[in-house]
Image (tube, helix red, strand yellow):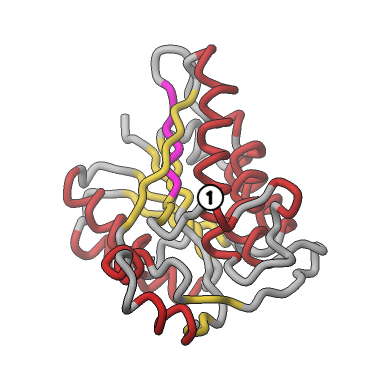
Amino acid sequence: MRKVVLITGASSGIGLALCKRLLAEDDELHLCLACRNMSKAEAVCAALLASHPTAEVTIVQVDVSNLQSFFRASKELKQSCRFQRLDRIYLNAGIMPNPQLNIKALFFGLFSRKVIHMFSTAEGLLTQGDKITADGLQEVFETDVFGHFILIRELEPLLCHNDNPSQLIWTSSRNARKSNFSLEDFQHSKGKEPYSSSKYATDLLSVALNRNFQPAASLFCKCIHFDTI
């Protein structure tokens, strides 16, 4: 039986690289590309099938900054006869909108002991603007964290249980900093580094999900940190 893997943000960047790597390791996978841009996703789907003709590759449209899109996609997946279960979900889609270089932090960082750390993680170097979505949430928080959480909860009936737990793998970052996250402002509406805050929030959420599901051995959740932001 084919393993079924869902990847958000699968049409470019880390998501696309992940698709290629997974199919290189197992070309019998059923890979579901969860993407916003359908024409781009269709081109990626065709290319993947051309290089791995024995695989099964399907597409579901998802806008990670729109809750209704998540609800529609999860309903489509649950009602489709192609998806009896989901073995793995890669929660990869995310945004860092309009990054700006913090000149002051750069200047002082060059003369500090943390210069290597600063350039490898971009800690304090990049600030971002943010905006409110149609759902009334901070865009980065909804895109990187909340929308994916809703997707997990909506797709729970498709997660494998008992002897065959599903896996949730969250794309995090070395830029995830506790100093940029606050429970009092978990959407980071008052700060200037919403990306860092959102990635730290996903780290916390993965721990919480494990605590919730592990007693029943029904799910395993982890975050993967990348050196680049």
Instruction: Give coordinates of residue 166: x percent, y percent.
Output: 44, 29
Instruction: Give coordinates of residue 96: x percent, y percent.
Output: 52, 72
Lateral position of residue 176 relative to residue 128, left or right: left
Instruction: Provide the residue span drawn in magenta.
Output: 165-170
Instruction: Give coordinates of residue 135: x percent, y percent.
Output: 80, 62
Which amino acid type is marked by label 1?
A: Lys
Lateral position of residue 105 relative to residue 51, left or right: right
Residue at 80% over, 69% down? 134
**Location of residue 109 with respect to 69 vertically, above or below:** below
Could you tell me which quadrant the N terminus lies in?
A: top left
Work out whether residue 45 can be spotted: no
Lateral position of residue 140 relative to residue 14, left or right: right
Q: Is residue 65 magenta?
A: no
Residue tagged 1:
178
Q: Nearer the viewer, residue 61 or 199?
A: 199
Residue at 47% over, 84% down? 101
Q: Nearer the viewer, residue 180 or 19?
A: 180
**Location of residue 110 with respect to 162 vertically, above or below:** below
Residue at 67% over, 50% down? 182
Residue 209 figure quarter: top right
Instruction: Give coordinates of residue 116: x percent, y percent.
Output: 26, 67
Could you tell me which quadrant the C terminus lies in?
A: bottom left
Q: Is residue 167 magenta?
A: yes
Kindly state the secondary structure of the residue where label 1 is placed. Answer: helix
